[in-house]
Image (spheres, rainbow, N blue to C red):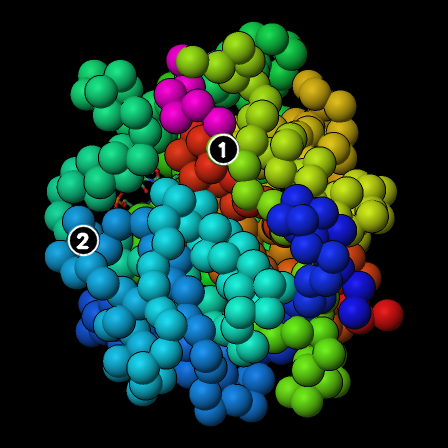
Amino acid sequence: MPCMPGIGKKSGCDEMNDVAIVGIGCTPVGEPWNKSLREIAVESTWAAMNDAGVNEVDGLVVGNMSSGNFVDQESLGSLIADYAGLGNITAFKVEGACGSGGVAFRTGVMAVASGMHDVVCVTGVEKMTDVVGDSATKILANASDREYEAVHGVTFVGLNAMVMRRYMHDYNARREDICSIPVNSHKNAVHNKNAMFRREISLDSVINSPMVADPLSLMECAPICDGAASIILTTRERAKEFTDTPIIVKGSAVKVDTIGVHDRKNVTSMTATVEAAKEAYNMAKLTPKDMDTAELHDAFSIMGVIGLEDLGFVRHGKGAHFAAEGQIGIGGKLPCCTYGGLKARGHPVGATGVYQILELTKNLRGEGVVDAQNGIAQNIGGTGSTVSVTILGRDI
Ligand code: COA
């Protein structure tokens, strides 16, 4: 049994299982006032189990950023296993801010790769819209450095606005080019029945939408919303028991950086993305040129631009131009955010990383909006303090 090169070597193990995705499921992203966190989590868990044709799993990893603050509920491993009827299995929650979904996926991959678990469900869930006023913004800011950033009133929109201002200064980048990121995401969301905003927006409407934190406008920011997404993982060897189209986890990495943006030498590149991408590409024995599609963490327009650069698709300073040329559109050189990305599908923070993997899986199975052999997903927590990079490919 071949080992996953990266994980196997690092852990000192010679033998690690290859890991495959055999089931996917999710709820529509939006503001489901009539459903609780547990209901959407169970709905997506059952949808993924149904897709895989399994009626039991031996592990559940929940990705969630802040259920204790958003809905006054913790202990999500037990809660979701209980209400999904999964019995006395291994179940727990992991957290990596807005990157919690990607961290949960990585945890599930480690569980199956190590051989400690056989069939694992990864469920990302967040219910953000049950709090009122500015509470969601305050809760999100808990993932920044509270003593040095949030305490002074800076929000995530504010931090990203500063990164964008610096980027525009360093690379003489045009705001209208950066704004083509949300235009692309909205265009792709039209075809996604699970997306929050299923409508196209023009470049002018992005540029002229209300300013939130200069230079970031409303239409450059992902919304506050609710959603849950789930993935079923098993070994490559067992995958064919469940599906004719298993999707292989070829590379998987999570890296961290300083929590405070002010402690970085360079704020226009995210070292955690660069390092995670390096490890994931090495593990997969693939390069950026082998990627047919990319799910970028476009929570803010500028994050999409920097993601293109940090994942190695273009040189630093060239991401905005690449997007503005239409290269990230469906039919372009590298279709990105093919189901609407964080901006238009929506960004229920702890669930986002799992939605990305689900969308990539659809494209790789041949039932999506692009026909891909290999694809990559990048999920960011904070302003790049925790980043996961996942490379998936067809089983060929
Ligand atoms: N994109 C498009 N439309 C949006 C939107 C968004 N991001 N956010 C809100 N809207 C729409 C709403 O649907 C609403 O439309 P309606 O009047 O037709 O119903 C309108 O704009 C006003 O919505 P409201 O909820 O009052 O917006 P807001 O001013 O409270 O919040 C933001 C807007 C951008 C500040 C908020 O969405 C936000 O903070 N986003 C960033 C979230 C974040 O930091 N996530 C983590 C990143 S890693």
Disc 1 to disc 2: CB gap under 8 Å: no
**Foreground mark, 1 or 2?**
1
Residue at 69% x, 40% y: name it.
279
**17 to the left or right of 215:** right
Tell me the CA gap for discs 1 and 2: 23 Å
**392 to the left or right of 61:** right
Res. 180 in view: no
Query: Can you tell me whether the CB of the residue at mark 1 lies under 8 Å from the nearest atom of ligand 1?
Result: no
Q: Residues within 10 Å of mark 2 (few under 14, many from 20)?
A: few
Q: Residues within 10 Å of mark 1 (few under 14, many from 20)?
A: some
Q: Which residue is mark 1?
A: 256
Q: Quadrant of residue 359?
A: bottom right
Up-down relation of residue 25 to residue 212 (above or below): below
The residues colored magenta run 257-262
Residue at 68% x, 89% y: name it.
241
User: Mark 2 is on which residue type?
Assistant: Gly
**140 to the left or right of 332:** left
Residue at 27% x, 65% y: name it.
76
Residue at 54% x, 55% y: name it.
106
| Quadrant of the rendered image holding ligand 1 | top left
Pick the front one: 205 or 377: 377
Query: Can you tell me whether the CB of the residue at mark 2 lies under 8 Å from the nearest atom of ligand 1?
Result: no
Res. 124 in view: yes
Verify whether residue 172 appears in magenta.
no
Query: Where does the image place residue 383, in percent across and percent down from the top left?
Result: 43, 30
Label 1 or label 2, whichever comes before in sequence order: 2
User: Mark 1 is on which residue type?
Assistant: Val
Q: Which residue is mark 2?
A: 68
Magenta highlight: main SS: loop
Query: Where does the image place residue 244, in percent across and percent down from the top left?
Result: 74, 85
